[in-house]
Amino acid sequence: MTDAFLPALAGIVDDAGLVTDRARMASYLTDWRGVFTGDALAVVRPRTTDEVARVVQACAHHGVAIVPQGGNTGLAAGATPLGLERAIVLALERMRAIRTLDREGFTIGVDAGCVLADVQRAAEEAGRLFPLALAAEGSAQIGGLIATNAGGTAVLRYGSMRALVLGLEAVLPDGRVVDGLRALRKDNAGYDWKQLFVGSEGTLGVITAAVLRLFPRNRATATALVALDDLDAALALFGMLQDALGETLAACELFSERCLELQLAHAPQRERPLPRHPWYLLIEAGSSLPGLRDALEAALAEALEREIAAEAVLAESSAQRDALWLWRESITESERREGASAKHDVSVALSSIPAFVREATSAVEASFAGARVLAFGHVGDGNVHFNVLLPPDGSASSEEINALVHGIVRRFRGSITAEHGIGRYRRDELSSHRSESELSLMRAIKTAVDPDGRMNPGALF
Ligand SMILES: Cc1cc2nc3c(=O)[nH]c(=O)nc-3n(C[C@H](O)[C@H](O)[C@H](O)COP(=O)(O)OP(=O)(O)OC[C@H]3O[C@@H](n4cnc5c(N)ncnc54)[C@H](O)[C@@H]3O)c2cc1C
C-alpha cells in the first residue's frame, strides 16, 4: 500500500513538495522544544488548496493519517507525528500568499502558510494593524495560529485568534474543500462552523486560507516596565491602569525576578532594566489619539505614590520599547536553553492569580527539591505560564510536577491550557479537567467530521 502511496503523492505535488529523505525530514518530526520526536512516511509541502485537497484524498484512499504542520512552534506537540504507523506531515509552509487586502473594509485574506510577521507587515504597509503578537511571530503561521486559537500579548484589547477570524477555507478529511472565505462581520446564516476549526489542533481538517480582521494603527504607543514587591500589587496596578487608560490598555505582561535572572544568565551583555524586585509588569497602551504617554505617566506616578509600584521606567524611543519587550519575549527561549522544564499554560479567574501562584509555588518547592518555578504570563487575561525547571539531579519528572500543579488548577476551577492547546502533551489529562458530557460532545463533533479518525490522531483525543 505504501509503495503505491508515495508515487500517488508524487503525481500531485512537485519534487520540492515531497520530502522522504530522513535528514531533510528531521526538523518536521521534532517539536519546537526538542522534547518529542516522531516519524512519518513523508513530509508533503503543497502549494495550493487544490493540491492539499488531492493529497488529503490520496491519504483517505490509502488509509494514511495526516498531521498538519504550520511553523512548528506549538508547545503541545500537536504537530509532531508521534506513535503513528502510517502518517504524513502536511506542511503548509509553501502556501504563503496574501490573497486580498481591503484597506477600507479592514480585512486581509491570506493563505494558511503565511507567517504571522508577514501578515503584520502587510497590514502595516497598508496603514492598518493586525494585532495578534507573540514571541514566535517570525515562524508561527496563520493556519497554526487558528488551529490553536493563539493568544499572545494583545488579547486584552483585541481578543485571541477566534475574535480575529472572519472567514475560513478548509479541506475536510475526505478531501472536500469548504469555502467560507467571507469578510462579513455579521452573519447568522446557520452554524458558525468556522469556529469549530479555531482551536481544533488539526483534528477536523486542514485550514488552507482565512480572512482576518484589521484595525486602525495606533499613532501613539506608550510602554513601561514596572517593578513590584508582590503579586497583589500586580492585580491592583492592573485595575488602576484599566481605570486610567480604558480600552487603550493593550498589554499587561507579568514576569518574576527569576525569569529576568535567567535571561541575564544566558545573555550577560544585557543590562538589568530596573533594580531587583520579586515581580515586574510590562505595560503597553496604544491609541490613535494624543496624550497617551502623559496618561500612562500620571497613572504610574500615582501607583508609585500609593506604593503599589516600587519602581518604573517608561520607554522614550521605539528602541527602548523593543528593549523592554525583549525582557518578556525572550523568557521562553532562555528557559529552553536552561534545560528541561514542566510547562503549565494555565488560566484562573483574574482575582485568583496571586493566590494560585503562591499556592502552586509553595507546593512545588515543598515537594520537589531543586525545582525552580518560572512564572510569567498575560496577567490581564488571567493566564499564567507557570513553568518549572526540573531538578538537575533528575529527582522529579515533568509528569509528577504537572499532576501537582494541575490538581491546584482544578481546585481553582481554572483551565490546564489557556492558549497552547491540548495536543499530545496534555492529552491524557483532558479527561480529568472536562466533564463527561463535554467530552462526549467533543467526540461527537470529531466523529461527525472525521469518522475514520485520520486527522491528527493522538492529538486532543
Ligand atoms: C517562543 C514562543 C512563544 C509563544 N508564545 C505564545 C503566546 O504568547 N500565545 C500563544 O497562544 N502561543 C504561543 N506560542 C505557541 C505557538 O506559537 C502557537 O501555538 C502557534 O499558534 C503555533 O503556530 P504554528 O504555525 O507554529 O503551528 P504548529 O506548531 O505547526 O501546529 C500547532 C497545531 O496546529 C495544527 N495546525 C497547524 N497548521 C494547521 C493547518 N493549516 N490546519 C489545521 N491544523 C493546523 C497542528 O496540527 C498542531 O496541532 C509560543 C511558542 C513559542 C515557541
Image (cartoon, grey):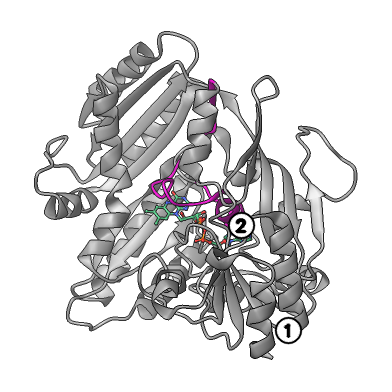
- Relative to residue 390, is residue 295 depicted above or below? above
Asked if residue 318 lies in the magenta stretch, the reply is no
Position of the N terminus, as image quadrant, is: bottom right
- Residue 453 at x, y percent in the picture: 72, 78
Residue range in magenta is: 127-151
Residue 147 - label: 2
- Relative to residue 234, is residue 337 depicted above or below? below
Report the number of numbered marks.
2
Position of the C terminus, as image quadrant, is: bottom right
- Residue 208 at x, y percent in the picture: 67, 54
Prevalent SS, magenta region: loop
Q: Identify which residue is drawn at 53% across, 31% down.
A: 122
Q: Which of the 4 image quadrants contains residue 173?
A: bottom right
Asked if residue 148 lies in the magenta stretch, the reply is yes
- Residue 256 at x, y percent in the picture: 25, 49
Q: Please rate how many residues cluster around mark 2, counting C-alpha atoms within 10 Å: few if below 14, some from 14 to 19, many from 20.
A: many
Q: Is residue 437 visible?
A: no
Determine the secondary structure under disc 2.
helix
Residue linked to disc 1: 62
The residue nearer to you, when weighing 309 against 281, is: 281
Q: Identify which residue is drawn at 57% across, 57% down.
A: 148
Q: Is residue 60 visible?
A: yes
Q: Is the residue at mark 2 in contact range of ligand 1, meaning its CB lies under 8 Å from it? A: yes
Determine the secondary structure under disc 1.
helix
Q: Are marks 2 and 1 in contact (CB under 8 Å)?
A: no
The residue nearer to you, when weighing 19 against 411, is: 19
Question: What amino acid does circle 1 point to?
Answer: His
Q: Identify which residue is drawn at 46% across, 58% down.
A: 346
